[in-house]
């Protein structure tokens, strides 16, 4: 059953009931909604067992609802990789701060009870960390048989994992957020390509054209060279977890190769704390260059109190700032307003822009024509460029993976409806007769003729 992340990217949560043992995979928080809809729909679990909560990675749309779930099911055992546990400290406290300040009166007070700094620490103390491929055996309070479970590196961000569950001779594989090709820091996924009966997969990029790293990198370098040659600075709005570490590493490699000049890089905020966790795992994780530390890349701290007076207005520089979609009030949003006034400056968008975000409005704005930005009318003189550096797989490598695993059932989540449909069609094209489930939120699906196995999801 899907309690979140059904035909969208939201409060991801997928529930499996296996012969009396209840396993929840992820408990996300919707990245934009600030009503009760922002949390996984736990009503759908009424009367069902919840024994184990597996968190695939530390992005808010997978981790942010964990305190909400643990308030309702305080006995639940929570399992994740070591890196995800370390990152959860930064991500949950940041998410808690945003929730406490932004949530409207529509959310019952109790829903936020576990989001105070003290409660978040108590929640975190109960987390169990595991190594990749280590097998855990679980049997819930009402479980009638053992369930074996292991996490496998999924290539998306530090600590990210897919989940393999074995039960009574049947295998289930949940991809988590997955990338099969190498990024700058992280290597491609190492999900097992052995047979699984059921594959539950993400579909984020399945409707868009394939992303080509090489041509996007050339485009980025050309944009930086052209803006800085005109004495301008480049702003790169970036998510603090994952994107920031990847883009910093890419910029540094481009400088070392001489593709772009050595320019001052400005960054800061939550990204700096996250860089340190990446550095801590620079030998332990499947990284491309063991021992390489993000903190070694020369960076200047953003002057958060005086953003409009930074030295990036005096000399050509690159500023990497969150949020990735210019959410109102964030550092990248405030800097973008300054950038709009500078004709020689440029903003490079490197990731997906949700249609409801200021980033999307800027991306679709016209040069020196008024447009609406989060409720205020503005216009921009600076240049913009759109690039795609995704931490999610293209459709083709995903379909190849699914074909190798040869499941009889494929459950498609974590994607807009077009992306889910596009993946479904490709899978059916390669493996006619496969049962495809694009689950609706809160609806239970039988995964085998044996009625003891069920799936429920929500977003
Ligand atoms: Zn993610
Ligand atoms: Zn996600």
Image (spheres, rainbow, N blue to C red):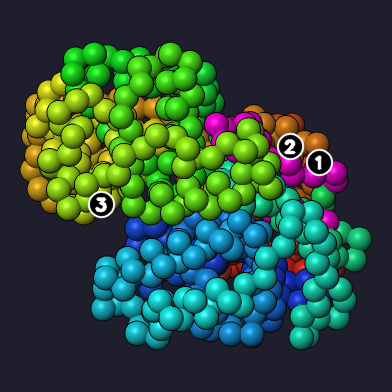
- First in sequence, mark 2 or 3: give its number: 3
* Quadrant occupied by the N terminus: bottom right
- Position of residue 6 relative to residue 257, above or below, is below
The residue pinned by badge 2 equals 401
Residue at 52% in and 58% down: 87
| Among the two numbered marks 2 and 1 on one chain, the one whose residue lies closer to the N terminus | 1
Q: Disc 3 marks which residue?
A: 330
Q: Are marks 2 and 1 in contact (CB under 8 Å)?
A: yes
- Label 1–label 3 contact, CB within 8 A: no
> Which residues make up the magenta segment?
171-195
Q: Alpha carbon of mark 1 to alpha carbon of mark 3: how far? A: 41 Å
Q: Is residue 12 left or right of residue 337?
A: right
- Residue at (69%, 74%) from the top-left corner? 52
Residue 345, position as x, y percentages in the image: 19, 25
Question: Does the magenta-highlighted stretch encompass residue 191?
Answer: yes
Q: Is label 1 in a helix, a strand or a loop?
A: loop
User: Tag on residue 193?
Assistant: 1
Q: Residue at x 58, y 51 (%)?
A: 280
Question: Closer to the camera: disc 1 or disc 3?
Answer: 3
Disc 1 residue crowd, few under 14, some 14–19, many 20+, Cα 10 Å: few
Residue 395 seen by the camera: no
């Amino acid at each position: 059953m899907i309690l979140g992340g059904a035909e969208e990217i939201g409060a991801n949560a997928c529930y499996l009931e296996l012969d009396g043992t209840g396993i929840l995979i992820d408990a996300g928080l919707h990245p934009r909604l600030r009503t009760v809809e922002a949390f996984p729909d736990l009503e759908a679990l009424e009367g069902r067992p919840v024994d184990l909560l597996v968190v695939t990675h530390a992005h808010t749309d997978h981790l942010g609802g964990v305190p909400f779930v643990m308030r309702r099911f305080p006995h639940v055992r929570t399992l994740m990789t070591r890196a995800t546990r370390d990152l959860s400290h930064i991500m949950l406290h940041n998410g808690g701060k945003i929730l406490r300040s932004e949530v409207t009166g529509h959310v019952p007070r109790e829903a936020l009870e576990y989001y105070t700094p003290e409660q978040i620490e108590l929640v975190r103390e109960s987390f169990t960390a595991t190594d990749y491929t280590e097998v855990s055996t679980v049997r819930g309070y009402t479980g009638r048989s053992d369930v074996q479970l292991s996490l496998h590196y999924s290539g998306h961000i530090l600590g990210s994992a897919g989940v393999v569950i074995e039960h009574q001779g049947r295998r289930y594989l949940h991809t988590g957020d997955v990338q099969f090709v190498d990024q700058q820091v992280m290597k491609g996924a190492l999900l097992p390509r052995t047979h699984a009966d059921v594959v539950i997969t993400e579909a984020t990029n399945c409707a868009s054209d394939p992303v080509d790293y090489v041509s996007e990198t050339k485009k980025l370098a050309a944009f930086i060279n052209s803006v800085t040659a005109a004495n301008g600075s480049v702003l790169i709005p970036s998510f603090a977890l994952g994107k920031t570490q990847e883009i910093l590493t890419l910029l540094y490699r481009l400088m070392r190769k001489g593709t772009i000049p050595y320019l001052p890089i400005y960054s800061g905020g939550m990204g700096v704390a996250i860089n340190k966790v990446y550095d801590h795992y620079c030998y332990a994780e499947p990284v491309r260059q063991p021992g390489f530390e993000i903190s070694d890349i020369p960076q200047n701290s953003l002057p958060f109190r005086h953003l409009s007076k930074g030295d990036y207005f005096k000399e050509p520089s690159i500023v990497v700032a969150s949020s990735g979609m210019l959410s109102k009030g964030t550092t990248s949003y405030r800097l973008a307003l300054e950038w709009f006034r500078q004709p020689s400056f440029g903003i490079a968008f490197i990731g997906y822009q949700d249609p409801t975000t200021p980033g999307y409005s800027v991306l679709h704005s016209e040069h020196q024509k008024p447009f609406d930005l989060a409720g205020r009318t503005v216009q921009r003189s600076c240049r913009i460029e759109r690039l795609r550096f995704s931490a999610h797989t293209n459709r083709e490598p995903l379909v190849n993976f699914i074909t190798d695993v040869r499941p009889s059932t494929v459950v498609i989540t974590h994607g807009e409806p077009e992306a889910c449909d596009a993946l479904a069609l490709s899978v059916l094209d390669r493996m006619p007769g496969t049962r495809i489930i694009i689950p609706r939120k809160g609806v239970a699906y039988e995964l085998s003729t044996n009625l003891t196995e069920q799936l429920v999801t929500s977003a």
